[in-house]
Image (cartoon, coloured by chain):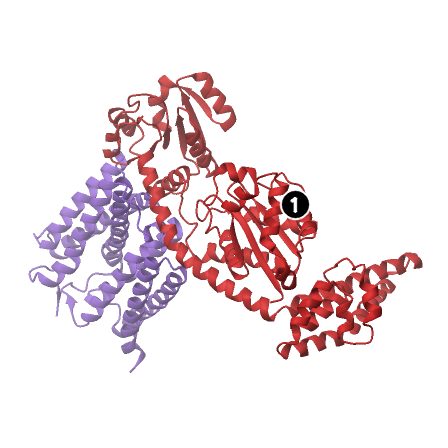
Amino acid sequence: MDKHIFLVGLNHRTAGVDVREKFALTSVADFEKSLLAACPLREVLALSTCNRVEILVVADAAQCANADIPAAVLRHWAAVCSGPLDVLEAHVYRHEDLEAVTHLFRVAASLDSMVMGEPQILGQLKNSYRKAVETGTARVIVNRLLHKSFSVAKRVRTETAIASSAVSISYAAVELAKKIFGELAGKTAMLVGAGEMAELAATHLLTSGIEKLFICNRTYARAQELAKTMKGEAIFFEDMVERLKDVDIVISSTGSPTAIIRAKDIRDVLKKRRNRAMFFIDIAVPRDIDPDVNALDNVYLYDIDDLKEVVEENMSARQGEAVKASAIVDLEVAAFATWMKSLALQPTITDLLGRADEVAARELAKTLKRLGEVDDATHEALEVLVRSVCHKLLHEPICFLKRRTREEGSAERFIDVTRRIFNLDQDPVNQDAHLDRRIAGDDEASGPDDQCECCRDDADGKD
Amino acid sequence: MALPEILPVLVIGLYFLGTALYVLGSALRNERLKVTALCVAGAGFALHAADLCVQIGQEGFSPSTARFLLSLMGLGILIIFVVFWLWLRLRFLAVVALPLALVFYTASSAAPGIKASLPPMLSGLFFFLHIGTLFCSMALLAMGFGAGLAFLNMEKRIKTKSGLKTFQKDMPSLNTFDRMNHWVIVAGFPLYTLGLASGFVWAWLTARRVFSFDPKEILSLVMLGLFAYLFHQRLAFGWRGRKPAITVIVVFLLMTVSMLGINYLVPTTYHGFKP
């Protein structure tokens, strides 16, 4: 491997929210570019969410020998966030090469998340990657690494049950409702009282297809207000029991010190609704619904503790699935390592052909501009002409690289040379390049090497 | 070995394999296993139907043989299962339908020489009215039995908050099982009544007596009473959930006692299968 991957970061386990806030990169513009300018790096990707900040960098092996890359990255990070470096250093974790790859795969697959299996992190990682691509700080390795991490995440999601059960109170309530009623379309719910968690549960029910939502509050104005935002119907608190006959799911979270829904009331309600099933979700503490309600046939009552238990059980089930997921990650890391070692030729060929196509397209556009109006057939013929000239010209070098790849040891050097000859990584040309060329112009192998960054020559020398 | 001889072995093998694979697939939550199981059982079903046709071809239409009747019952259960599968998406009931089809088909193969002591006058119309309706309602009850057991177990787990088992997460909702129970009762009771009534009419036509205190007749009347009570409670009083589920299970168990127990073990009944 002539390149090293480093990952430094902090997450909810290593740093408190104050530290994470301090070193968040969400509001830092062009962090990747500034890091690339400040440190001797080839590629940079930064991920910043409320639970984690991660910086992934790729550097040439030669540069790593001379500098402590992670330390340099941390210095720049602390400087950009105007935070104390010692605090940052105390809270970060550092990973290198395959360890970094493993960590990234685990993050993408949500194995490292606070709520294991939650799907948001993948979207956030995709956004970070898009940003890196747009700013041009993602190249061969970051490209491959990120694409691979997305596919690992997908594999973990489909091959394990890591995300199959609800791990939040409100989702657990919706899941239970589905187990009782089947499809929620056409069902009616009632929200008694207000409260963040109750409103969240009601929102989840609405998105799951509940047909109608009644909102009941001691303060009618508050009920009306909520009804407006949640597109429900406000009802008077006094009418609550009377209206229950049309309601399948009740979510209650009032501040009442005594039970507001009693078993006696529900027995009558059940008669009126001909025993159609009812599901009560009591989020209030102290409880709003008499626990005896659960003893009635076709009535199911879950209070906050019961729901918490469901969530905890699901969490422990996810832990079990995490073992399976880790095995998938390990397999994929091994595959990535193989790619890093042996398939570096492939991206080079892709880049080479990409560059050729780019040149061809540019030259074609110039020629077409000069020619003025041409018919479609001529346009197509010109396009084929420039492309085939480019590709035929590259045919021999590509065959040469492939041949050399088969001979172990020599491939890396030639790939490196090719990348530099065609400047595939679009490195700025060194000021001393022409001088170097004049001095060592006689040697056919070392000539092209010498014209590039001098630090690379050290690595070649060591090989 | 000629095809008709090998058919029963094949059908039993396929049903057994289908049942085992489906149970395994449910336990492991493996969709591919379940689909394979249903394909295997489907092949068994086709051969089962072919076997019945071969029987009719060889022996003529002889509805009084135990072999024919039990085999028909097995086939009926699978047909009713397919109806519920397509209609209410209750594929889960394969867990009940496949083993029952296996039991009935195996019982039919084990009794090739046994004949019910039914006079040969049981013509097409009465066969349809008596056997056809009763078998349909019995197959419905069998499915209701499976749905009832699944309902009771899942309901208990939800009610006592003991958490659902892994395989239960793939199962239909309580409401679906209850709807199934509703249709078993709504369709099963009239069919059962018609089957019983036609039996009494036929008894009167052939033997000039309606009721002969046959154990099977007594049990059938008990079942009819229970069924009627259930029908009434469900439709008029809005019974739902546990109570109708338990009652359907009881009626099905009585039916099994009547069908397999009395027919084989009680020598005095005129419904009995005698060698």
Furthest residue in direction bottom, as rendered: B1
Is any atom of residue B207 visible in this view?
yes
Q: Position of residue A224 (x, y in %)?
A: 48, 20
Q: Quadrant of the C terminus of chain A?
A: bottom right
Position of A248 relative to A13 (above/below): above
Foreground of the two, A330 or B223: A330
Classify residue A244 by image quadrant: top left
State the residue at coordinates (21%, 49%).
Answer: B249
Q: Colour of chain B?
A: purple
Q: Position of residue B25 (x, y in %)?
A: 35, 61
Q: Give the amino acid at mark 1.
A: Phe
Q: Position of residue B20 (x, y in %)?
A: 30, 64
Q: Residues within 10 Å of mark 1 (few under 14, many from 20)?
A: many
- Please give the letter of the chain rendered in red: A
> Which residue is disc 1 drawn over?
A31
* A361 relative to A124 in the view: left or right: right
Q: Position of residue A21 (x, y in %)?
A: 54, 37
Foreground of the two, B129 or A393: A393
* B150 relative to A15 in the view: left or right: left
What is the chain letter for disc 1?
Answer: A
At numbered mark 1, what does the secondary structure look like: helix, strand or loop? helix
Classify residue A304 by image quadrant: top left
Is any atom of residue A127 visible in this view?
no
Query: How many numbered marks have been drawn onto this rendered protein structure?
Result: 1
Position of A108 relative to B55 (above/below): above
State the residue at coordinates (34%, 54%).
Answer: B92
Q: Quadrant of the N terminus of chain A?
A: bottom right
Foreground of the two, A461 or A263: A461
Position of A113 relative to B270 (above/below): above
